[in-house]
Image (cartoon, rainbow, N blue to C red):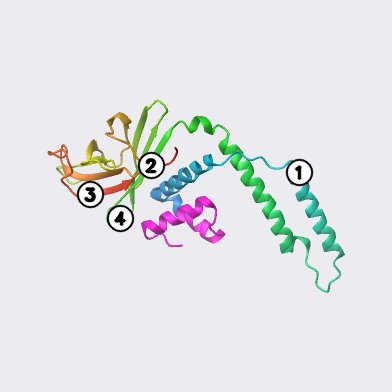
Amino acid sequence: MKLDTAEERSVAAGEFVLGTLDDTARQAFEAAMAHDASLRAEVAMWQDRLLSLTRHAPPAEPSPSLWSRIDARLAWAGTRARADVSPQPLPWWQRLGLWQGVSGLAMAACVALGSALVLRGAPDAAQDQRYVAVLQGPQGGGNGWVVEVRVDAAGQGRLRLVPVAPSGPVPAGRALQFWTKAPGAAGPSSLGLVQAGSTVELPTTRLPDLRPEQLFEITLEPEGGSPIGRPTGPILFVGRAVKLTS
């Protein structure tokens, strides 16, 4: 498994959350994730993104006869295996047809049960608006920060800027400044200075706007911040917001 580029890391995290990695790839990914905070952030982002999709599906309940059908099929397969008089009979647990049927039923049960559990209590959660943006180095330098925004039905909310990887020391006489720009806005707005490696929390009233695809970035500015109200230094980390719930 390759995790050298931002695209490879994002794809691997999505496959991990979906459960489509094979055993070898999954174990390698889990080992990498154990000591890679930015990879864990990718996983969290995919979990939130995919979880929100389940709210568009109606709750489903497994059939009351599901487990009795599985038991009956297992018993039937065992009888067939014992009655098989071919020269080299296959044990019932190695028969492809059986496991295709059982795995299909089990998958249906898991999906139905998972949907019911996830959707239980969803009406309250659906009142919130949630956004996430992963800020990466503009030249593919990896993830550095995650922006998380939650706004409740009353329009009150908080923004959190969370570091997920060491950003390195800030040069003497310089500072990190946090900016945002909504689609169509004339220019970016400052959200203040941030300390390297420190989490920042702000009320969403500080945001001039909040929309999907909203730009967030961190630039290197003179100590005390940009003197002209817009970025003057290099962009260190940048990303766009994804809306997780509607």
Q: Which residue is mark 3?
A: 235
Instruction: Name the residue nearer the viewer: 103 or 30.
Output: 103
Residue 84 seen in render: yes
Looking at the image, residue 233 lies above or below residue 9: above
Say which residue appears at 37% left-offset and 38% top-offset: 148
Would residue 110 be found to the left or right of residue 198 on screen? right
Work out whether 140 lies above or below 112: below
Find residue 104 and report its image quarter.
bottom right
Is 102 within the magenta?
Answer: no
What's the amino acid at mark 3? Ile
- Tell me whether the residue at label 2 lies in contact with that at label 4, contact meaning CB atoms closer than 8 angstroms: no
Q: Amino acid at mark 4?
A: Gly
Residue 150 position, x and y percent, is 39, 34
Q: Is residue 3 left or right of residue 195?
A: right
Q: Nearer the viewer, mark 4 or mark 3?
A: 3
What is the quadrant of residue 130 in the picture?
top left
Q: Which residue is mark 2?
A: 132
Mark nearer the N terminus (4 vs 3): 4
For residue 65, the mark is 1
Q: What is the three-letter code of the residue carrying label 1?
A: Ser
The stretch of residues the image draws in magenta is 1-29
Query: Mark 2 to mark 3: distance in Å?
Result: 19 Å
Label located before the other in sequence (4 or 1): 1
Look at discs 2 and 3 and give the one toward the viewer. Answer: 2
Pointer 2: residues within 10 angstroms few (<14), some, or many (20+)?
Answer: many
